Amino acid sequence: MKKLACIFAIALFSVSMISCTNDTAEDQSLYETQATDGNSNGSTGRDG
């Protein structure tokens, strides 16, 4: 019975991790990074 409960729990967690929505290009823009050339405020990160 314990083994059956473990299998059921694993199946439940696996199904709950599946996304029900389709990935769109709009969603992918959240993960894109922008290239920068270091600190945008010109500071060196040191005091003095």
Image (cartoon, rainbow, N blue to C red):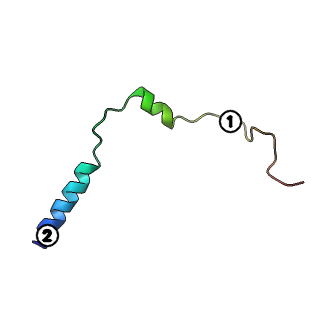
Residue 28, percent from left and from top: 45, 32
N-terminal label among 2 and 1: 2
**Toward which corner of the image does residue 23 lie, by quadrant?**
top left
Quick one: quadrant of the N terminus?
Answer: bottom left
Residue 17, percent from left and from top: 29, 49
Please state which amino acid type lies under the numbered disc 1: Thr
Q: Residue furthest left?
A: 1
Q: For residue 3, which numbered disc appears in the image?
A: 2
Tell me if 22 is positioned left or right of 45 in this view: left
Position above or below: 25 against 46: above
Tell me if 32 is positioned left or right of 17 in this view: right
Position above or below: 32 against 9: above
Please state which amino acid type lies under the numbered disc 2: Lys
The residue located at (14%, 72%) in the rendering is 2
Residue receiving disc 1: 36
The residue located at (73%, 40%) in the rendering is 38
Tell me if 28 is positioned left or right of 15 in this view: right
Q: For residue 13, which numbered disc appears in the image?
A: none
Q: CA distance from mark 2 to mark 1?
A: 53 Å
